[in-house]
Image (tube, helix red, strand yellow):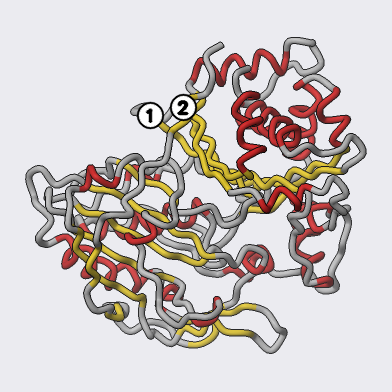
Amino acid sequence: MVAAEVVERVTMEGISVKQGKPTLVRPAEETEKGLYFLSNLDQNIAVIVKTIYCFKCDDNGNERAGEVIKSALEKVLVHYYPLAGRLTISPEGKLIVDCNGEGAVFIEAEADCNMEEIGDITKPDPVSLGKLVYDVPHAKNLLEMPPLVAQVTKFKCGGFVLGLCMNHCMFDGLGAMEFVNSWAETARGLAISVPPFLDRTICRARNPPKIQNPHHEFEEITDFSLTTELSNDEMLYKSFCFDPEMLQNLKLKAMEDGVLKRCTTFEALSGFVWRARTKALGFQPNQRTKLLFAVDGRSRFNPPLPKGYFGNGIVLTNSLCRAGELLDNPLSYAVGLVQEAVNMVTDDYMRSAIDYFEVTRARPSLSSTLLITTWSRLSFHTSDFGWGEPTLSGPVALPEKEVILFLSHGKERKSINVLMGLPASAMNIFEELVHF
């Protein structure tokens, strides 16, 4: 079988981006003030996520891009007014939003080149792509960073890039996608097709809390394989493209011994990547290893979360085993563990996870862990602000070295790019293993 294609880094380190003066964009109308509740599902993933959207402007040009997008932001913030507030700490010691209407941060910028010179953005590159997203100066922690920061960078070719910096505690991937698409619809003068449902108290912890399930996602694993010593190696970030034929062959390989009757693309790819990464890092056979990934709980809650739920509707599920078990058994073993983790996510499990945080305030541990986050089903590529759909879109950086990202790829979005970082020596081994 042909190996997964490795997309090499193309940097824009030599490109100069001149930023204008940042402004605050407030909702176009008066909005509700006061404190806005964030659920325990929001508390667990308060990390900054940076994404970019590249637009070609063959006919319209980019002269009015900043003006149109800023004006639409003012209007869409009327519906998504917590994004114009600021994070603070509640009396219970949790994150909460002060809806003070201070505004989202907006900035226009100009690049001294054509947009094509950015290169292929299918691999996170925080040094170069980071120039397309505004960093609020002197912001030392999450509380000092606005929930939403937007930068529009114009290029000489007439194209532009929208760079967004958003806090994951405000929404998960689906919620972020619905917000960006609502913003784009507003820019085109359309009504919002999926209005946000703002009340997150429907995901409030029970009183008294009931922890009914084991929650190994929070478990700290001792790393006696000394993989921390590999951290002295240079970290390499690469993208591996799995086309539809390769994905189908992975599924067949996972089922070839007859243990599994069926499996999804996500399950097969996750099991394969978990095994290959574990081997590449040289885990000892008795070393315990954990797989974490998010499952969309919207339809799994009873009753299901309302359409347009503005917040994190995902819950982390997990699988735990010894490295020897993972590597000595066929692929079906790893994929079976992934299936069990998916099926574990029920209303009881999710309510138990919410209550677990209420009691312990614990956060998921990433020691000896792989965390897979999946964007392959999210239609960020459909956000049309009036210049057509973006030609490219994707993340600027991976939030942690333990995180791997699945992104849809190709014209029909049927391929999956696996974006990841590993120490150089481990990455060389991983590359050999994808020649399956």
Query: In the rendered image, which residue does mark 2 sit on?
Result: 415
Q: Residue at x 84, y 51 (%)?
A: 223
Q: Secondary structure at mark 2?
A: strand
Q: Position of residue 307 (x, y in %)?
A: 50, 53
Query: In the rendered image, which residue does mark 1 sit on?
Result: 410
Label 2 Cα crowd, 10 Å radius (few <14 / some 14-19 / many 20+): many
| Above or below: residue 169 compared with residue 59 | below
Quadrant of the snapshot with the N terminus: top right
Q: Residue at x 49, y 34 (%)?
A: 417
Amino acid tagged 2:
Ser
Q: Residue at x 75, y 36 (%)?
A: 278
Amino acid tagged 1:
Gly
Q: Position of residue 94 (x, y in %)?
A: 67, 79
Disc 1 + disc 2, Cβ < 8 Å: yes
Figure quadrant of residue 250: top right
The label shown at residue 50 is: none
Q: Position of residue 288 (x, y in %)?
A: 87, 43
Can residue 302 be seen in the rendering of this structure? Answer: no
Closer to the camera in the image, 60 or 178: 60
Q: Secondary structure at mark 1?
A: loop
